[in-house]
Image: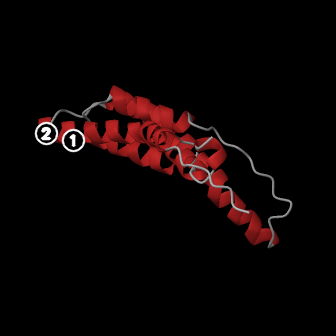
Amino acid sequence: MRINRSINYFRRTIGIILCFAPVFVLSASIGYGLAHRGALKPAGLVFVALGAIIGALNFYLSFIRPYLYWRKRNSTEAYRHISGFPVVGSFLAFAGGVVSFGSEPIALFALITIIIDTGGPIWFLIFTWHDSSFWDE
């Protein structure tokens, strides 16, 4: 028997806007930097670099570590998932991009970091999209 649940489009739209807000802001930073040809602002580079390190760790724990375990044992039965640092890498990258607003290389680096950080808001949206108990109830 199939239960007919209505999809909460309003809640999902708010989720999309919130999860992609850092992407929109960093894209605006790139656009502003291209239009105004400002000097390189390395002030946020430290934040973005720390965020990239944490994002790379989250990516490793989400995809590479399970694959290596499977390759070694040919099974994932006894595999234990380890959580990285959810949201921290994306937050640091976003903060660095905002501090250096208008610097195209730093904003691009922050954008790439947010995309690869599997503990960030975009991946949260991807991983929970089909969970109707989260979005639709």
Q: Secondary structure at mark 1?
A: helix
x, y percent for residue 12: 49, 43
Query: Which is more toward the observer, 14 or 65?
Result: 14
Which residue is drawn at the image coordinates 50% and 39% (left, top)? 11
Q: Could you tell whether 128 is left or right of 46 in the image?
A: right
Which residue is denoted by mark 2 in the rendering? 35
Residue 23, quarter of picture:
top left
x, y percent for residue 1: 74, 63
Which residue is drawn at the image coordinates 69% and 65% (left, top)? 67
Residue sitting farthest toward the right: 78
Q: Secondary structure at mark 2?
A: helix
Which residue is drawn at the image coordinates 19% and 33% (left, top)? 39
Q: Which amino acid type is shown beneath numbered disc 1? A: Gly
Which residue is denoted by mark 1 in the rendering? 31
Labelled pair 1, 2 in contact (Cβ < 8 Å): yes
User: Disc 1 versus disc 2: distance between alpha carbons?
Assistant: 6 Å
x, y percent for residue 88: 56, 34
